[in-house]
Amino acid sequence: MLDTDIVIVGAGAAGLSLAHRLPAAGARRTAPSVALVGAPPGPLRAPARTWCFWEAGPGRFDPAVTASWEWLRVRGPRGAVVRRHIAPLRYKMIRSDDFESLVDRDLAGRPLTRRVEATVTAVAAQPDGTVRVRGTDAAGGPVELRARWVFDSRPTPRPPAARTRLLQHFRGWFVRTERPVFDPAVVDLMDFRTPQPARGLSFGYVLPTGRRTALVEYTEFGPAPLTRAAYDRALDDYTRRVLGTGATRILSTEQGVIPMTDALFPRRPAGPVFPIGVAGGATRPSTGYTFAAVQRQSDAVAGAVRAGRRPVPPPPYPARARLMDAVLLRALDTGRVDGPDLFFRLFDRVPAGRLLRFLDGRTLLYEDLVVGARTPVLPMLRTAAELPWLRRRPAAP
């Protein structure tokens, strides 16, 4: 059995980010020993993916950034365009493989942190106040660790009860075109010139890395993912009909599903096991953005360890932001608001800096009211009035 101060279960964005900070949480004599447990190669290891976020100036993970931009663009269903300059912020893209390589390089010289490859099967608090983590290695052999604290980023087996449950599901192509069709200075954040589904909304998302190269995604907010063939048909239509790319070569693909829910995640766990990342509520329900909240969560945990406090991850977003998200999700799910119109209106009528602070959950009350006034007010007020009377229901088995 391996004894350590901290075990981090899961080596995705949340686990890697926390491991990256913890070795620096104290002087060498007092820094915690850390075991980062990731799944062995196979079906349980998360596929490569892309994370995006915005920040001002140089960032901690800039060596892993594939590309960054100062301009964002939103296109309406009939072609209207809003183009926003977000400096001093930059919108940054990191590919998960590059992020993992950066973290591994930085941790290589830190003997107090070690990587463990295992499929975790049980995490259980013990009567003596420690936590035992059990699993199996790639060969099926037992792995057992004992720690003072465990940070668990695995998805919960069954999602918490919620009033509204949507999914942000998407598939992306990294493409190369024969002729220069992309503007490498501008991200198309939401392009609503896609056929809209009967429930929810859809949009294209374009992250250009050159005049001929880009990540192009088709995204829906809706009740269920599509088949791979349906995504590819939508992407083919978007790249050829809408973007007019002409001859295009697909270099690689990515696909994912992000929960968009008003479920209440555990806020202050009583024991020594703490959920982090998506499992700890780091996904912004109204947008699906997660990476920046994971960094705030990791910073707070490292600060608590440094100060000798119980390292409870704080709520990634304030209660007011979660309430506004709950209203928006319910309004979208009931069809009371037109999704493309609502998001286009926000980017058209709210200054970019304020809107991005709002999406990060960092606006003041008066700013939230100003943003709220730029939405369809009556449908949103009706939705807000009914929320207290709606029961949170568990997810279907």
Image (cartoon, rainbow, N blue to C red):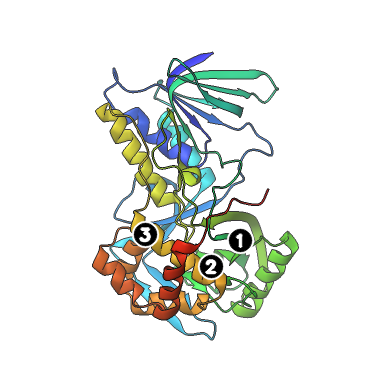
Q: Position of residue 97 (x, y in %)?
A: 54, 44
- Mark 2 crowd level (few <14, some 14–19, many ≥20, 10 Å Cα): many
- Mark 1 crowd level (few <14, some 14–19, many ≥20, 10 Å Cα): many
Using the image as rendered, state which of residue 365 and residue 283 is in the foreground.
365
Image position of 14 (left or right of 333): left
Which element type, helix, strand or loop, lies under badge 2? strand
| Label number found at residue 205 | 2
Q: Residue at x 59, y 50 (%)?
A: 394
Q: Quarter of the image holding residue 176?
A: bottom right
Work out how far the residue at label 2 is from the one at label 1, CA to CA, in angstroms: 10 Å
Residue corresponding to mark 1:
170
- Of circles 3 and 2, the one toward us is 3
**Which quadrant: the N terminus?**
top right
Image position of 364 (left or right of 15): left
Residue 187 visible at all: no
Would you say the residues marked 2 and 1 are in contact, meaning their CB atoms lie under 8 Å apart? yes
Q: Position of residue 2 (x, y in %)?
A: 51, 15
Q: Is residue 361 above or below residue 106?
A: below
Q: Earlier in the sequence, mark 2 or mark 1?
A: 1
Residue type, label 3 = Ala
Would you say the residues marked 3 and 2 are in contact, meaning their CB atoms lie under 8 Å apart? no
Residue type, label 2 = Tyr
- Of circles 1 and 3, the one toward us is 3
Which element type, helix, strand or loop, lies under badge 3? helix
Residue corresponding to mark 3:
321
Q: Residue at x 72, y 66 (%)?
A: 230
Residue type, label 1 = Phe
Q: Earlier in the sequence, mark 3 or mark 2?
A: 2
Residue 181 visible at all: yes
Work out how far the residue at label 1 is from the one at label 3, CA to CA, in angstroms: 24 Å
